[in-house]
Image (cartoon, rainbow, N blue to C red):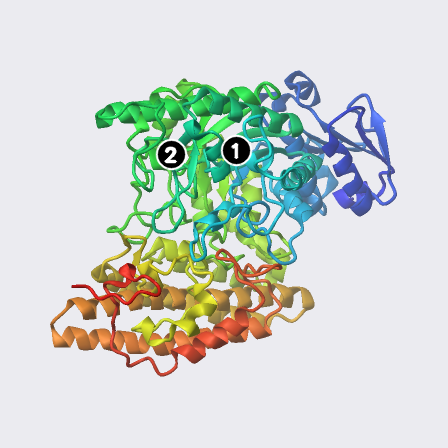
């Protein structure tokens, strides 16, 4: 009985549509290179596939699809492989991105299946109409300098998984154009979510940015969009807007100054954007948006993030420095409701302006807005939603940042949105979505199946059950458009990434059986004899994360930014000399007057966690997380010992290294939590027994973190697995560099002998001014 591989080997002609989609050529070339050796590529005017040929086609007309196969007309999106008796192979799909996904499924999943299995046509009907990255960490955002990154491999992988869009607006340079005074950190945020004015200019700001700078950025964006088109995908942008502009533009047009948008502790120089309430500024944005879409016609959307990272909407309540702006939104001495309504109307006018400018070129162009920051303006924004203006959000039913879902393991904790632990999506979302759609709008809903905001800087960490539960919940509530927050991981970095394999499989089949899928992938990767052991480790890793209480989300989500792996963790950090701390403080997300430099409990005025809650989280990590991750690590080592052939050993080695890295990561998180619990319980208590217990916690924490760092250093020196994100250019606040091993060695040396230090934090740390000796009165 011939297999699909056998049939393809005998195909000498690959037929594509005359004047058809570019992805047809891409698929034909891949088939010619891999499965149909030496086959000629020819253009064809019909969909027939005679014996010895493969017909490759995007069939977007429902009438034609029905003629091809009646059941296809019942679905908006589909992809199909068919091998008619006595004929060739038909590889067809309703959309360009699905054609490549179908070809990937053919080559990777179905190639050795019997050909007769495809006689009636093997059709798949995608779970989601749109699947796209949001904040693509590797391609466009803070990890884009990662060593060994191949943009085409990355984009091809998106298409392989069934993504419909790629995010394309990256800066061409490792560092942003924006700079600031020595010692401040705000300018570092301009490296991601690059704004429109980093790619094109208008008549208003012509010459503010060097033309060669803009050209380089635009050329990179075009390259990304071109690669996306090659693999059948459309493109989009994620921008912080309205973002601040250089001072010299405001000096040129002082009457156009908008809101102050910087953070008063992270910045030492005020940043202002332009007032989008002014018609000249609106024309400036309309011109830039239209120019962008004319330069890159593949663009389908712009997603606007705001009120963060040097961007903000005037007079909205969540501005870092408080409600403020120019003189054109609302006059002074108005009440909260009037201000909120005026601010919301100004926001919505801006979103509609972007949509309308884009639609001068692309009639389907969308303007999306990230919504959490606007709880006070929520109702006024909701009233004005309309076709082509969509939300990008974790929860449609939520108001603001508070997402009312329970942590998967603890009834007294909320599910932390922004992580895979927010694995639910219930009926109230369907109701809100229906109301939104009645206005002509829709929502792109986030999910978080990767390393970014879960275990960063680690990559390839398995938690497939959590991913599956989220995908099932999204599909059950009728979500049409989903956004992979943080973006995918290149396969060359994590070749056995079960989370992402699951996403691609679920996109093809929303009725996917998880157990059968995991068994299938494990069998492929390590063999039938060890498949059950591999799936058991994946589930242990999932269970460990499911039990993680997330004591401080900015530390588990952005631990690199706070240098948790490389900075000493001792009871009194200032027992270590300032000059000895420079190696990590230079990149720490904290200027010299931010208490976070010496106190893990606080950051920019936020009290991140109480000592009592930290103590509870510490107990839960010790009882529920560490035993599971230790078991997973030990099981991975046993799996490696049992793997005999080269293929199995490659899989087992990859997993063993990632489980060791994960074990070190959880220990580091636990020890930071122990620091907060121990130091602040000691400082706040007068009970000697309690203080003694706190000293014991900190003593053990120091010794454990020293040993943990040694374990991580050993992995760093010995492993060839790419288990973490690492820059090819240099260390920044957002990414480590090749000198990580040196930093780990320095951390160990600096921590030695500090296990018995008395806990202390200077409560007046933030009032210090360099070069001035000052004592509080």
Q: Determine which quarter of the picture holds residue 758.
A: bottom left
Question: SS class of the residue under badge 1?
Answer: loop
Query: Which residue is outermost to the bottom?
Result: 753
Decide: is 598 above or below 470.
below
How many residues crowd around disc 1 within 10 Å: few (fewer than 14), some, or many (20 or more)? many
Image coordinates for residue 124, horizontal then vertical, percent: 60, 34
Please give the residue where the numbered disc 2 appears in the rendered image. Answer: 259
Q: Nearer the viewer, residue 647 or 307?
A: 307
Decide: is 485 above or below 78.
below
Q: Left or right: where does residue 531 sit relative to residue 26?
A: left
Please give the residue where the numbered disc 1 appears in the rendered image. Answer: 128
Image coordinates for residue 595, horizontal then vertical, percent: 31, 60
Residue appearing at x 41%, y 78% in the figure: 750
Quadrant where the N terminus lies? top right
Cα distance between the residues tagged 2 and 1: 38 Å
Question: Upstream in the sequence, badge 2 or badge 1?
Answer: 1
Q: Nearer the viewer, residue 524 or 319?
A: 319
Can the viewer see residue 631 in this picture?
no
Q: Are marks 2 and 1 in contact (CB under 8 Å)?
A: no
């Amino acid at each position: 009985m011939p297999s699909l591989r056998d049939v393809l080997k005998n195909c000498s002609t690959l037929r594509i549509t005359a004047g058809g989609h570019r992805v047809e050529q891409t698929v034909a070339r891949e088939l010619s290179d891999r499965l149909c050796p030496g086959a000629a590529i020819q253009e064809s005017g019909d969909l027939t596939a005679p014996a010895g040929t493969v017909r490759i086609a995007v069939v977007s007309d429902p009438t034609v699809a029905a003629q091809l196969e009646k059941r296809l007309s019942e679905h908006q999106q589909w992809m199909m492989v068919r091998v008619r008796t006595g004929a060739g192979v038909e590889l067809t799909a309703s959309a360009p991105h699905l054609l490549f996904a179908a070809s990937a499924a053919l080559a990777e999943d179905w190639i050795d299946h019997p050909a007769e299995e495809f006689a009636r046509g093997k059709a798949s009907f995608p779970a989601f109409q749109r699947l796209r990255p949001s904040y693509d960490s590797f391609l466009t955002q803070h990890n884009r300098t990662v060593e060994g990154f191949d943009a085409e491999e990355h984009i091809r992988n998106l298409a392989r998984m069934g993504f419909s869009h790629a995010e394309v607006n990256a800066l061409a340079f490792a560092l942003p154009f924006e700079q600031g005074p020595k010692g401040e950190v705000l300018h570092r945020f301009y490296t991601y979510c690059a704004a429109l004015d980093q790619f094109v200019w208008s008549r208003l700001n012509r010459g503010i940015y060097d033309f060669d700078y803009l050209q380089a950025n635009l050329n990179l964006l075009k390259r990304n969009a071109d690669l996306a088109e090659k693999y059948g995908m459309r493109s989009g942008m994620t921008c912080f807007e309205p973002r601040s502009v250089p001072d010299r533009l405001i000096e040129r047009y002082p009457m156009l100054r908008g809101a102050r948008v910087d953070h008063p502790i992270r910045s030492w120089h005020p940043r202002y954007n332009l007032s989008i309430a002014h018609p000249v500024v609106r024309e400036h944005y309309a011109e830039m948006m239209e120019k962008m879409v004319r330069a890159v016609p593949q663009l389908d959307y712009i997603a606007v993030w705001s009120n963060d990272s040097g961007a903000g909407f005037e007079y909205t309540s969540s501005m870092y420095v408080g409600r403020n702006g120019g003189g054109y939104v609302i006059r002074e001495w108005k009440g909260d409701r009037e201000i909120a309504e005026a601010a919301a109307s100004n926001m919505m006018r801006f979103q509609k302006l972007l949509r309308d400018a884009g639609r001068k070129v692309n009639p389907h162009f969308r303007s999306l807005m990230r919504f959490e920051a606007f709880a006070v303006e929520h109702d006024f924004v909701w009233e004005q939603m309309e076709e082509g203006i969509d939300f990008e959000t974790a929860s449609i039913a939520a108001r603001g940042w508070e997402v009312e879902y329970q942590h998967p393991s603890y009834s007294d904790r909320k599910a932390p949105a922004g992580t895979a632990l927010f694995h639910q999506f219930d009926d109230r979302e369907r109701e809100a979505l229906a109301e939104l759609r009645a206005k002509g709008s829709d929502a792109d809903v986030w999910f978080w199946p990767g390393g970014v905001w879960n275990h960063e800087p680690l990559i390839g960490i398995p938690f497939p059950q959590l991913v599956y539960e989220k995908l099932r919940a999204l599909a059950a509530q009728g979500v049409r458009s989903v956004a992979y927050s943080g973006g995918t991981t290149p396969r060359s970095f994590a070749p056995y990434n079960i989370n992402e394999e699951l996403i691609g499989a679920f996109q093809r089949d929303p009725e996917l059986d998880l157990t059968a899928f995991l068994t299938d992938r494990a069998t492929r990767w390590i063999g039938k004899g060890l498949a059950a052991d591999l799936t058991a480790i994946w589930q242990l890793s999932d269970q460990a994360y499911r039990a993680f209480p997330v004591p401080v989300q900015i530390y588990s989500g952005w631990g690199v930014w706070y240098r948790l792996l490389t900075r000493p963790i001792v009871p009194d950090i200032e027992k270590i000399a300032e000059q000895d701390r420079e190696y990590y403080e230079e990149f720490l997300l904290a200027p010299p007057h931010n208490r976070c430099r010496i106190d893990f409990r606080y950051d920019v005025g936020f009290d991140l966690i109480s000592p009592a809650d930290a103590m509870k989280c510490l107990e839960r990590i010790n009882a529920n997380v560490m035993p599971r991750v230790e078991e997973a690590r030990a099981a991975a080592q046993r799996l490696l010992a049992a793997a005999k052939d080269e293929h199995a050993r490659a899989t087992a080695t990859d997993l063993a290294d990632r489980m060791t890295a994960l074990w070190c990561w959880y220990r580091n998180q636990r020890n930071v939590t122990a620091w907060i619990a121990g130091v602040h319980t000691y400082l706040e208590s007068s009970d000697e027994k309690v203080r003694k217990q706190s000293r014991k916690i900190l003593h053990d924490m120091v010794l454990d973190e020293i040993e943990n760092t040694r374990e991580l250093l050993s992995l760093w020196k010995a492993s060839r697995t790419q288990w973490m994100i690492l820059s090819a250019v240099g260390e920044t606040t957002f990414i480590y560099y090749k000198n990580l091993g040196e930093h780990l060695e320095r951390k160990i040396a600096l921590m030695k002998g500090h296990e018995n230090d008395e806990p202390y934090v200077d409560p007046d740390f933030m009032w210090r001014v360099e070069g001035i000796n000052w004592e509080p009165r």
